[in-house]
Image: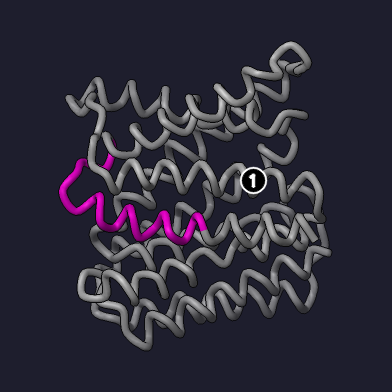
Amino acid sequence: MEGVLFAFLASVFWGINGVFLRLGLEKEDVFSSTMTVMLIGSVATFLVALGDMQNIRVDPHKAILLVAAGFVSYFLGRIITYRSIPIVGSSRAYSASSTRILFSAMLGVLILKEEINLLILSGIVMMVSGLYIFTTERINLKEFYISISSGLFFGIASLLIKVGILDNVFLSLSIATFSGFTFLAVFCFLTGRMFFVRNKYILLSAATLTSGNVLFYYALKISPLVITVPLSNLYPVITTFVGFLTVRELERINSKTIAASIVTVFGSILISLGHS
């Protein structure tokens, strides 16, 4: 029961994070903001892990996988998602990133030789249908399609984290997050974006994202993947509804947006259930 609660709360924090980002990225540089979020997250989780560091054994091979996951997720995937938010809106960008479940299923079939079944096929059809509804809206379609690619990177990162996660959740998160921060810092330095963003919404985004990540990892430790992943993937719906209540004009949320979010996420749930 605790795992179910943690997974759901993770989706709530991630969903609220999308709204904070929508507000914060209106006036801030995407790369500097993302770097700030990653720095806060890596430092916060490391400080917590530090208290139990003497009892932690770090497998170098797993650490390398977490570093790779940080690059794929926090550098590639998150940059794509964040840069899409000011253009297509957080609800649409987050729904596009939720295709991580779809890509995880595809990677499982192609790489891990897992079998595809009716539930997975139905989920893929529903997810594609939900994304198609988004494309019928008056939005930047090119940017929306680009934002979908973030789901591929998040899907790859999920495989890397699943294999590389350490006994200590906080240290695992710290390694992956610091990896993403390092690559972002190098990029920001080379492009003249190397500065800490003090926007209150970006700082709130860092807090909610880190909280959601911690809850998600704890849920994975004590609950089956088939329960944790679908519940944690409810964040696009939460972002859509919170955005509808708080930043409706900024987000341009309508009935199509809400319907597409629900259909897309429900499709991802079917795909996850098909993996059981």
Of the pair 37 and 124, the residue shown nearer to us:
37
Determine whether 267 is above or below 57 in the image: below
Q: Determine whether, in the image, residue 196 is placed left or right of residue 39.
A: left
Q: Name the residue carrying label 1.
A: 158
Which residue lies at the image location 25% right of the left edge and 21% below the top edge? 189
- Residue type, label 1: Ser
Which residue lies at the image location 21% right of the left edge and 41% below the top edge? 29
Image quadrant occupied by the N terminus: bottom right
Q: What x and y, as percent, mark residue 248?
A: 26, 75
Q: Is residue 17 magenta?
A: yes
Q: What x and y, as percent, mark residue 54?
A: 74, 11
Determine whether 23 is above or below 269 in the image: above
The segment highlighted magenta reads 13-31
Q: Residue furthest bottom?
A: 255
Q: Counting other residues with Cα less than 10 Å from the Cα at mark 1, is it few (<14), some (14-19), or many (20 or more)?
A: some
Determine whether 71 is above or below 81 in the image: above
Of the pair 203 and 229, the residue shown nearer to us:
203
Quadrant in which residue 126 is drawn:
bottom right
In what element is the residue under mark 1?
helix
Image quadrant occupied by the C terminus: bottom right
Of the pair 30 and 200, the residue shown nearer to us:
200
Determine whether 83 is above or below 36 in the image: below
Q: What x and y, as percent, mark residue 28?
A: 19, 44
Which residue lies at the image location 20% right of the left edge and 26% below the top edge? 191
The colour mode here is one colour
Q: Determine whether, in the image, residue 264 is placed left or right of residue 276.
A: left
Which residue lies at the image location 72% right of the left edge and 25% below the top edge? 62
- The overriding secondary structure of the stretch rendered in magenta is helix
Q: What x and y, as percent, mark residue 70?
A: 53, 33
Q: Residue furthest top?
A: 54
Quadrant in which residue 198 is drawn:
top left
Q: Is residue 234 magenta?
A: no
